[in-house]
Image (cartoon, grey):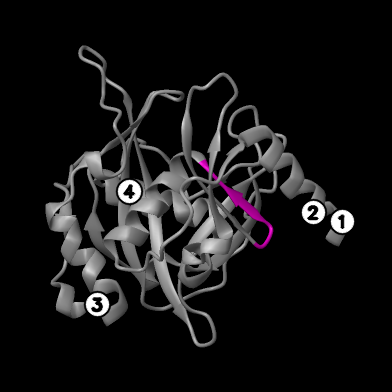
Amino acid sequence: MTCEMSGPLVDPAEVPDWLAELVRASAATDAAAFTRLTVPDGQNPRAASVLVLFGEQPVHGPDVLLLRRADTLGSHAGQVAFPGGGAEDGDEGPIGTALREAEEETGVEVSGIRPVAVLPRLYIPVSRFAVTPVLAHWEEPSPVHAVDLGETAAVARVPLSELADPANRFMVRKPGGGWKGPAFTVGELFVWGFTAGVLTALLRLGGWERPWDHTDVRDLDVAWARHMERETGRE
């Protein structure tokens, strides 16, 4: 299994102007830009990758591909994520893992995807994964869908403008004064945790971030429940 160093894979001049700043920024970005957590000494976490796939649509402009995990899963049920998963024998490094998982989960045609940068490994203590985000440009978009409804409830192209909208952003915390992190509500999606943290950093690095209220801190369980109530009421 090969392993890519982090940083750009292409010349920023070779990608659309709206994506160039992010590709350029990946050259000087370390894991601290995304998380304060590091792999504990003496541990060898399992390797995983996620595909952060950026496309563009005529009406909504630049977007990113996200999925919502099935509510019946034993772990991370109902959570929004990037396509991705654990490395397997035969994968050609983190990029190979990210592309394979994206195809398996969303049906995307990987021939139309161009990887443009690899970010540093990010440690997730809950699952004990060391996750490598692979940034990619969707040069030739293809239809996507939830391939296995037992694992994925929905797949969506989410405009970056909606993620950057201050009205869709706030902070969430778990009870007891422990973990606190950024969150988004965009359409039917409630995004928090690892995915929201990565998106927050990417919006900043890519030059898309708009000022938003970091002091708006909500209890995670309450915020999620209210979001689900609103979406149920729209059905």
> Where residue 110 sits in the image (x, y, percent)?
40, 65
Q: Which residues are magenta?
A: 187-192
Q: Indicate which disc, 3 or 4, sits on the residue closer to the N terminus.
A: 3
**Residue located farthest toward the bottom when viewing the structure as drawn:** 58
Q: What's the amino acid at mark 3?
A: Val
The correct choice, above or below, for 211 with respect to 59 in the image is above
Residue 168 found in image quarter = bottom right
Q: Secondary structure at mark 3?
A: loop
What residue is drawn where x is 29% and y is 51%? 95
Which residue matches tag 3? 15
- The answer for how far apart the CA atoms under marks 3 and 4 are is 18 Å
Cα gap from disc 3 to disc 2, whole angstroms: 38 Å
**Is residue 14 visible in this depiction of the protein?**
yes
Q: Which residue is mark 2?
A: 230
Q: Which mark is residue 233?
A: 1
Q: Position of residue 200 (x, y in %)?
A: 40, 52
Q: Secondary structure at mark 4?
A: strand
Tag shown at residue 133: 4
Tag 1: amino acid: Gly
Q: Secondary structure at mark 1?
A: helix
Task: Tell me where residue 34 appears, x and y as whole percent.
Answer: 31, 43
As helix, strand or loop, the secondary structure at mark 2 comes to helix
**Looking at the image, is mark 3 or mark 2 earlier in the sequence?**
3
